[in-house]
Image: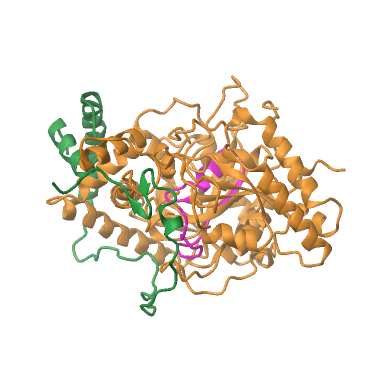
Chain colours: A orange, B green
Amino acid sequence: MTNLTKLTLSDARDGLRGKDFSAVELAQAHIDAIGQAGQLNAFVTETPDIALEMAARSDERIARGEAGPLEGVPLGIKDLFCTKDTLTTASSHILDGFVPAYESTVTANLWRDGAVMLGKTNCDEFAMGSSNETSYYGPVINPWRRASDGAQLVPGGSSGGSASAVAARLCLAATATDTGGSIRQPGALTGLVGLKPTYGRCSRWGIVAFASSLDQAGPLTRSVRDAAIMLTSMAGHDAKDTTSVDLPVPDYEAALTGDIRGMRIGIPKEYRIDGMPAEIDALWQQGISWLQDAGAEVRDITLPHTQYALPAYYIVAPAEASSNLARYDGVRYGLRVPGDDITDMYENTRAAGFGAEVKRRILIGTYVLSAGYYDAYYIKAQKVRTLIKRDFEQAFEDVDLILTPTTPNAAFAPGEITDPVTMYLNDIFTVTVNMAGLPGISVPAGLSSDGLPLGLQLIGKAFDEETLFRGAGVLEEAAGFDAEPDVWWA
Amino acid sequence: MSIDQATVRHIARLARIRVSDEEARQFEGELSSILTWVEQLEAVDTNDVEPMTSVIEVDMKQRRDEVTDGGMPDKVVANAPERENHFFLVPKVVE
């Protein structure tokens, strides 16, 4: 039998339907791989019993000819998605012991289509971070190591556990969420495809909220086709989320025609930032050539307010977070630390339950929303956000997709970045997309001089994920990225 | 914009997070540097610009105002750190 953990999701799907192997065998192969990969710390909770039970039911449905689109496909689920009767922590101490009585809409959609849950993946606490170092359950380790010194590296964040798990072949794909780059940045740093859909494409119901006007669920996968298959199941209108859009969900896999002749690709000059490593710039130029060679027409464009996206984000996101995280008060769920009176209990609980980065963001958010500062910070940032969105709308009058690097650097070592603002700059190329609500995808495009994966990002028009997938498929084909990390952890 | 430790303590109180003296010192520096960094937004001309209220252009959906779910008090209180019957227990609030 082939090594079942080496398959792409699409190959595994086809193999299951062809009865080359069973869903139980496929689940067991991944359970075994997870069992050997404890060093990566990719999972907060492993659910092998649930996986084998779900896989057994998948095998029954396959035998009856009732296989769903994801029948028998084993997935990792970011621990931000509420899963009925399975511990859900958002990688925070404050959600100790929280077992939801309900299922998030996105995961419910995946189970409806036959997918199998292997466990809940580690992430930055409440998805706040770019390195997965803020998790209460400890940092996640990237399966990739630097060629020069063999140093252990971060997988990026916040969806670091999902990224490490998919890159290390512990699952065929994983769910993730992206508020400022939390799918695309770890995707780039671990050699994966990471897709953030248009805001409103996937329901946010049942996903632990960080910044509600920016949060969006998406997949981390080992191919563009796998991302298309995952989104087709994850997306869809949901009456329980008023911001989920009532649009038909296309068959995204069918969009992968490989034909981008005549497609117009925009190159924003503002993304050529000072101090960008030469190899990132070279990869970007290579990406432009690949798309041109495939028949696309490349145009220079301008997105004048790009540099203001990140500072505006660090007002809007903490403001929304400070409001969303007010619910963690030690009364209805999670951690409770006693106090002399109720305020004392709140303060003790939240002091013990939140980590340093989450506290920083709640405090910033509280400050910018407080009396006397609301207009100067929050309203100002929302006005800048209007301008950022307008930049994209004007650019998309002339182009179909925009090509940029995904990150300004390859993966770094734990502890290497300690200054909060320096860490925030890791999202400089991804955060604009969230601020404008657009879809973006990171495609693995090459290796750094130190042997680490680097990604290129395509940005699409709102709700035009099909064009995004078509462009990404061509980029993937041209890059031919087939490097894999050495299996040092097993 | 720099903020001092008294301001850190004030907003921490508003946010209901107890901070130690050491944390107040650390947050003073970190929050000041973040707030100074976001000040670059002042350079953007936002006269006649509307603040964003929705990132996608959709009409607010309406629904009938009716009960669609409920009748599950056991599940509602199941995760509470302290409960009695179907009530959440908190420290005494009213004297």
Q: Position of residue A259 (x, y in %)?
A: 68, 64
Look at the picture and state if A274 lies above or below A66: above
Quadrant of the frame with the N terminus of chain A: top right
Magenta stretch, main secondary structure class: loop
Can you see residue A274? no
Horizontal relation, residue B77 to residue A470: left or right:
left
Q: Position of residue B50 (x, y in %)?
A: 24, 66
Residue B68 location, quadrant: bottom left
Q: Which residues are magenta?
A: A178-207
Horizontal relation, residue A275 to residue A116: left or right:
left
Q: Residue furthest bottom?
A: B64
Residue A203 is one of the magenta-drawn residues: yes
Q: Position of residue B25 (x, y in %)?
A: 21, 26
Determine the residue positioned at 56% across, 25% down: A152
Viewer-closest of A259 and A323? A323
Horizontal relation, residue A301 to residue A172: left or right:
left
